[in-house]
Amino acid sequence: MKTVFYHNDSGRAWITIDNPPLNALSPSVQAGLIEAIASAEQDACTTGVIVCLGRSFIACSDNATPDRLQNVYQTLEQSPVIWAVALHGAMHGCGLELALAANIRVATADTLLEYPQAHLGLTAGADEFPRVNQFLGAAIVSDLTNHDHLLDAQALLTAGAIDSIVGEDVEAHIDDLLNAIEVSML
């Protein structure tokens, strides 16, 4: 079953993840993201958007190893395309880690970051989420991973992990931001 869809809209790449129910970063999503990012680069797209269908942005990693996930994050981070992500609903550490590899992060007010490992008495290592640790700081991440706390969109904005909070039409807001960036590049 295909979980990642790519579309080139006049030089703007659109990547849609549809892996219900939690948009897990499964092996098929990881491979699909890497393939879609490569397609955007081959199509010479200057900007791109990553969105997830359903109730949430990436809410789990489907037990992927940190090394495999880092390959996906680095592919996005090193891409010459200017990438924006549309965050909504729940996301876990790997979802924010992917978002932080993008250039622009826009969230709806219902966006929440949590670490489900805390529910199970497990902790996430600092090496598992280096971008999250860099943006939020080790103390906040330790609190999240060890004490089952949540961060809402406002806390993520204050910490600098997202760029803006918008209403329901996050994709239109991202489209406007990227249009402005493209104009400034002329």
Image (cartoon, rainbow, N blue to C red):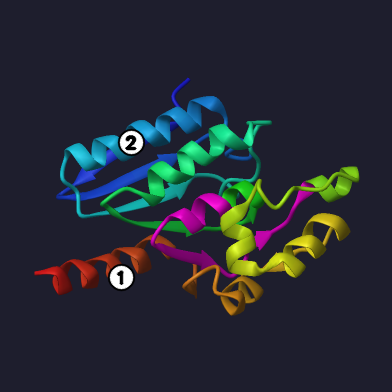
Q: Is residue 109 magenta?
A: yes
Q: Which residues fall within the magenta stretch?
A: 96-116
Whether residue 43 sits left or right of residue 5 in the image: it is: left
Q: Which residue is mark 2?
A: 36
Q: Is residue 108 magenta?
A: yes
Q: Nearer the viewer, residue 68 or 161?
A: 68
Residue 180: give x, y in percent of width and height: 22, 73
Q: Which residue is mark 1?
A: 177
Q: Nearer the viewer, residue 164 or 80?
A: 80
Q: What mark, if any, has residue 131 been given in the picture?
A: none
Residue 122: give x, y in percent of width and height: 85, 44
Q: Residues within 10 Å of mark 1 (few under 14, many from 20)?
A: some
Q: Amino acid at mark 2?
A: Ala
Q: Amino acid at mark 1?
A: Leu
Whether residue 42 sits left or right of residue 65 in the image: it is: left
Residue 86: give x, y in percent of width and height: 46, 58
